[in-house]
Amino acid sequence: MAKPAAPAAAPAVHAYLRVSTDAQDTANQQLGVLEYIEQKGWPAPALVEDTINGKMPWRERGIGALLAGARPGDIVVVAEISRLARSTLQVLRRRSLKRSEI
């Protein structure tokens, strides 16, 4: 008799917080992101914090590691789209990447 299939793992929730300099902090971003996640009823997120200039290639930042380890269906929350890239075009390019390219 075949074993029943294991239930699919629930999607993980990730919060990506980025500032450009050590003189800044992620507290405001974190507050807004956590409030949003709570309103959605999602579980507490894994926080990924970066203090790095947006000029650094994205694969070398925390967002690169986060996306490389994310599974299909996982949720990534950011305080604002500018935390992901320096331009809308960069965000759109990143969004269109196939899973195998990340």
Image (spheres, rainbow, N blue to C red):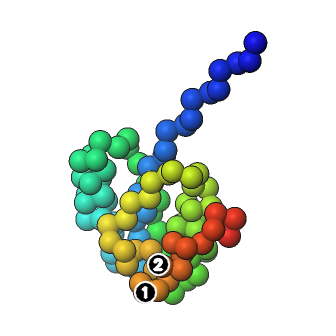
**Image x and y of residue 33, in percent:** 30, 58
Where 67 falls versus 14 (above or below)? below
Query: Which residue is tagged 2?
Result: 91
On the rendered image, what quadrant is the N terminus found in?
Answer: top right
> Are there few (<14), some (14-19), or many (20+) residues within 10 Å of tag 1?
few
Q: Residue at x 57, y 29 (%)?
A: 7
How far is the residue under mark 2 from the one under mark 1?
A: 7 Å
Where 12 falls versus 15 (above or below)? above
On the rendered image, what quadrant is the C terminus found in?
Answer: bottom right
**Image x and y of residue 78, in percent:** 37, 65
**Image x and y of residue 71, in percent:** 58, 51
Q: Residue at x 32, y 72 (%)?
A: 80
Query: Which residue is tagged 1?
Result: 87
Where 93 falls versus 29 (above or below)? below
- The amino acid at mark 1 is Ser
Q: Quadrant of residue 30?
A: bottom left
Q: Quadrant of residue 27?
A: bottom left
Where 67 falls versus 60 (above or below)? above
- Numbered disc total: 2
Tell me the SS state at disc 2.
Answer: helix
- The amino acid at mark 2 is Val
Q: Residue at x 65, y 21 (%)?
A: 4
| Viewer-nearest residue: 68 or 47 | 68
Is residue 54 something that shows in the picture?
no
**Image x and y of residue 86, in percent:** 44, 85
Tag 2 near tag 1, CB within 8 Å: yes
> Are there few (<14), some (14-19), or many (20+) residues within 10 Å of tag 2?
some
Name, please, the residue furthest toward the top: 1
